[in-house]
């Protein structure tokens, strides 16, 4: 039996694609292994969204190829977004790679690996619509939580974004397919779902002609075993009153929403082919906070977009100070070829972009410190993620796995991973909370 390993990079949506491939390989007679040196064939499931992601992917490919050169592994397969975007360049520049396939070829991953192991190289890029959305998965996450992908592709056409070029047009899963998968995963012990897509709030528009995320959430809440549901990648224009009301009313839906805003200045957002401005976005966020008690807001901003002036950046800084997000990420604009913004005038110097990103994150760090200080003494329902020496690491509803911080706490009794306990916050350390289990 041949052994296969996978390095999956980038976003959770790519991770789900990787899990589907692993299940196909498992059923196809391959043994799944964790370490490069234990494998016969290694798959690198790449990201190609921005420059830093591309660099990480190329570094991973080169590292794995060194194992092949040393005779430790037999074959190297590259798939994912970088492969889809740079179809010819990878094998040309890195000839040690045995197969480069697009995301539409993930359905054929077993055949691709079999060919690679007997020395047959593959370069295969079928239509992106063949990317599997509904197939069974071999979870790469801990057994108590999982991602649940609603759709793939995107039609929003933000001027800076290469995702429509890489992933194709928006297409979504039928609601019954999502419910069936959630039921099966819950029966297997999954207690927390993180709903993902390029734009989760658009769900339902393609298949049903209207937004159906609120209805989907209500149906997911009726599944036995599910305790927490989180929403990621929500587009601000599509956060409807119905959606807000469902989040507020349903106990299983975490009062947590990830809503990447990218900026707050109206002119910059218009140039990004997005909508809104300081006033309209603030109005939406305040409405959400008013109607969803104790809401945890996560967002992402982009700085250094072409033409961003110091005044517009300062407006963004004021916005962050004004709203006081619970979680915030920030990245410097990356000029991606074949996107409209790549050809925009007034591109900003890399040093200036990075300085602005650092300033914005410094502002957020102060906000987070103040928020964490105010959480001392509060008791949170906490899911146990892992044990670290004599302490446990977990999360309250405030934190999503892999991307957010968490709670480091002690317990007088042994705790099971995936169990829920009550933790009193006693201190904080930067972004992390410190606590003690009280039951």
Image (cartoon, rainbow, N blue to C red):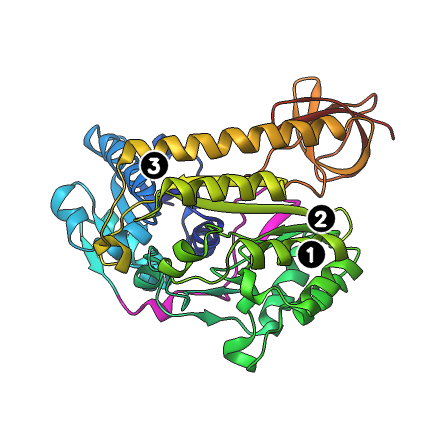
Instruction: Tell which circle, 3 or 1, labels the residue nearer the N-terminal end.
Output: 1
Which element carries disc 3, helix, strand or loop? helix
Q: Position of residue 237 (x, y in %)?
A: 54, 65
- For the point 44% across and 39% down, the residue is 33
Q: Is residue 245 visible?
A: yes
Q: Is residue 225 visible?
A: no
Residue ranking furthest to the front = 311
Instruction: Tell which circle, 1 or 2, labels the residue nearer the N-terminal end.
Output: 1
Q: Give the mark toward the camera: 1 or 2.
A: 1
Location of the C terminus (image quadrant): top right
Residue 81 is left or right of residue 389, and the answer is left
Instruction: Tell which circle, 2 or 3, labels the residue nearer the N-terminal end.
Output: 2
Q: Is residue 111 magenta?
A: no
Query: How busy is the neighbourhood of tag 2: few (under 14 within 10 Å), some, or many (20 plus)?
Result: many
Name the residue carrying label 2.
295
**Quadrant hosting residue 143:** top right
Name the residue carrying label 3.
353
Rendered position, 47 above or below 157: above
Q: Position of residue 34 (x, y in %)?
A: 44, 36
Which element carries disc 1, helix, strand or loop? helix
Residue interval drawn in magenta? 126-147
Q: Position of residue 108 (x, y in %)?
A: 33, 62
Mark 2 vs mark 3, CA separation in Å? 31 Å
Name the residue carrying label 1.
288
């Amino acid at each position: 039996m041949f052994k296969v390993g996978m390095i999956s990079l980038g976003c959770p949506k790519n991770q789900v694609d990787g899990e589907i491939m692993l299940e196909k390989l498992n059923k196809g007679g391959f043994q799944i292994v964790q370490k490069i040196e234990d494998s016969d064939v290694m798959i690198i499931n790449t990201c190609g969204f921005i420059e830093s992601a591309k660099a990480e992917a190329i570094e991973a490919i080169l590292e794995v190829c060194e194992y092949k050169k040393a005779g430790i592994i037999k074959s190297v397969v590259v798939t994912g977004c970088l492969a889809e975007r740079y179809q010819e360049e990878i094998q040309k520049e890195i000839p040690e790679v045995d197969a480069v396939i697009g995301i539409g070829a993930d359905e054929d991953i077993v055949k691709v690996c079999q060919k690679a192991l007997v020395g047959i190289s593959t370069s295969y890029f079928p239509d992106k619509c063949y990317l599997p959305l509904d197939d069974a998965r071999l979870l790469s996450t801990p057994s108590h939580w999982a991602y649940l992908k609603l759709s793939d592709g995107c039609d929003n056409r933000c001027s800076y974004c290469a995702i429509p070029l890489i992933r194709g047009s928006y297409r979504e899963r039928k609601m019954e397919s999502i419910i069936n998968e959630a039921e099966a995963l819950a029966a297997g012990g999954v207690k927390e779902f993180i709903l993902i897509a390029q734009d989760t709030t658009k769900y339902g528009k393609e298949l049903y002609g209207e937004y159906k995320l609120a209805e989907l959430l209500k149906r997911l809440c009726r599944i036995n075993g599910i305790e927490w549901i989180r929403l990621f990648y929500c587009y601000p224009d599509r956060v409807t009153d119905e959606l807000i009301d469902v989040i507020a009313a349903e106990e299983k839906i975490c009062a947590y929403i990830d809503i990447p805003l990218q900026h707050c200045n109206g002119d910059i957002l218009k140039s990004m082919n997005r909508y809104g401005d300081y006033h309209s976005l603030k109005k939406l966020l305040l409405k959400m906070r008013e109607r969803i008690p104790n809401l945890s807001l996560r967002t992402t901003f982009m700085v250094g977009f072409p033409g961003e002036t110091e005044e517009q950046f300062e407006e963004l800084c004021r916005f962050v100070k004004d709203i006081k997000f619970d979680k915030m990420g920030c990245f410097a604009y990356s000029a991606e070829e074949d996107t409209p913004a790549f050809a925009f005038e007034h591109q900003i110097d890399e040093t200036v972009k990075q300085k602005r990103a650092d300033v914005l994150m410094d502002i957020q760090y102060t906000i987070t410190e103040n928020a964490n200080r105010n959480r001392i003494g509060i008791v949170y329902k906490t899911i146990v993620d892992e044990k670290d020496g004599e302490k446990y690491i977990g999360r309250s509803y405030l934190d999503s796995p892999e991307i957010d911080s968490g709670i480091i706490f002690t317990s007088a009794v042994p705790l099971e991973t995936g169990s829920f306990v009550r933790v009193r916050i006693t201190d904080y350390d930067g972004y992390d909370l410190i606590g003690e289990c009280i039951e």
